[in-house]
Image (cartoon, rainbow, N blue to C red):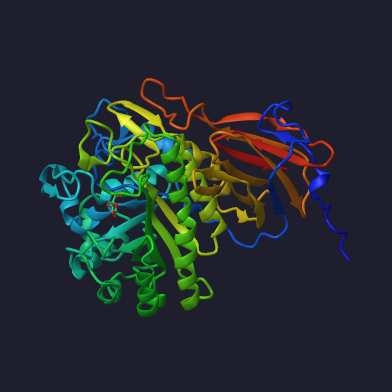
Amino acid sequence: MKTPRLLFAFATLLATVGAPAAEAPASAPASNRLILHADQGKTAISRNIYGHFSEHLGRCIYEGYWVGEDSPIPNVRGIRQDVVEALKRIKTPVLRWPGGCFADEYHWKDGIGPRAKRPAMINTHWGGVTENNHFGTHEFMDLCEQIGCDAYISGNVGSGSVQEMMEWVEYLTSDANSPMANLRRQNGREKPWKVRYFGVGNESWGCGGNMTPEYYADQFRRYNTFVKNHGDSRVYRIACGASDFNYNWTEVLMAKVGRRMDGLSVHYYTIPTGSWGRKGSATDFGEDLYHATLRRALEMETVVTKHGAIMDQHDPQKRIGMIVDEWGVWTDVEPGTNPGFLYQQNSLRDALVAAVTLNSFNQHADRVKMANIAQTINVLQAMILTDKEKMILTPTYHVFEMYAVHHDATLLPTELQSAEYAFGPDKIPAVSVSASKDKPGKIHVTLCNLNPNQAAPVHVEVRGGTVQTVGTRILTADTMQAHNTFENPEAVKPRALPTANVVNNALLVTLPAKSVVVLEIE
Ligand code: AHR
């Protein structure tokens, strides 16, 4: 019989983390208790949960990524380098493009060949501006190669033909002596690209064609037939999924499409007020809308659980991935900016939304195989904001950087008992958690305290593992509205806390009010 590994009961490991000992004595009462099963992980957290989405919308592509080769802003083949470097630092695993709603009116052949000769179009969804197609297939694939991420391309079902989609896949991935592969070669790319993920339509129940689920399911079957695997390319096919709580869409797709798809998407946005007409400001809000925003963000747990339960009925072995390919906070635009450009600031509140949502995806890693926050630069809950040559990182970016420790790590089961954070009659759990063990054996625990008024002491019991040192990083700020600006770009940024001492074999972590904390346990 093997010697059992050291078992740490709650009372057997004691340390204080996250605040000076005077504020968080080891004996402080904790209504939050966490049990971490260090030896029971089975499921890998796909790094693609930390994916991104970039649409031809506002200043995401143009100004965000694309400045052109002649720009004074440092660039490689027209793509700005500060942005590429920032996205490499958070280990961006996958990037979805070109939409969004834009995808269903995008005709890829307009975006290849000499730029000066590419036809322009009107971006009818987003501000009615002229799209000159200077950023097309070659530029997007170059961007992915510069970042070092996988490409996730959304094909056009709404206004595009089956032939058009079939030819795009051939252009991208075929190494044969074929018409589309030769056209690609003529345009300067000899070898095919590796395109792992391909979406067959976007929001086909709305901007992508206003289809019924039954009609879309048939369309998927038809279009997907012509999404070919060329050579050794194996395309992971993603069907357009439901919005929010439309469980019937998932039911119909699972029943009528089933294993013909590899992934089924779902979209869920957090609207602070809950009303699309007046969504609320990104930075000018009180505790009422702070609480409401987090309450609505936590609904992602319901969305994933309930769509997942329907998928389980049809696919108990979980071979079809849930792909949450649009999510994030959607507020009113910044005053004075184009309403069609969806430019919004990003505060500590957004960071907390990202942190609890990513914890939820991690906890559902057996089903959630990819997620793509909307949208990377200058649009919705962005990672990065740019103003000409200037670039700043948002609080949400910092969460993605802190949580990168979970990429491809093994999810560890957790049991959490959390205090409530109440505002008026509305209550939400104050604490959120997920934990994983990486390949070298380090454990990472990501915790959030949503309560903006009180610190949260959490008793952590690690079962089935040894604890010698605990390192801590934290993201917080003085106010819930705190955000980074071009004048003050580092108002919200993570900081490391001194490694905690393990005393008397217990770990008491004090999460400051409105904070995100990562523990590294060795
Ligand atoms: O992300 C903005 C838009 O939201 C996307 O274009 C669309 O798919 C969704 O409705």
Residue placed most toward the observer, 323 or 428:
428
Q: Which residue lies most toward the top here?
A: 487
Residue 242 location, quadrant = bottom left
232 above or below 129? below
Work out whether 55 lies above or below 254. above
Q: Residue 99 placed where, x, y %?
A: 28, 53
The answer to whether residue 165 is above or below residue 440 is below
Between residue 328 and residue 73, name the one nearer to us: 328
Quarter that holds the N terminus? bottom right
The answer, for residue 458, to whether it is visible in the render is yes
Q: Position of residue 465 (x, y in %)?
A: 77, 51
Instruction: Identify the residue at horizontal 75%, vertical 31% (top origin).
Output: 25
The quarter of the picture where the C terminus appears is top right
Residue at image coords 69%, 34%: 17
Residue at image position (57%, 40%) is: 449
Judged from this view, the residue extending furthest toward the front is: 425
Q: Is residue 430 visible?
A: no
The residue lying at 61 percent from left, 56 percent from top is 411
Quadrant in the picture for residue 370: bottom left
Q: Is residue 225 above or below residue 384?
A: below
Q: Position of residue 417 (x, y in %)?
A: 66, 51
Count of number-bearing discs: 0
Residue 201 in percent (x, y) is at: 27, 63
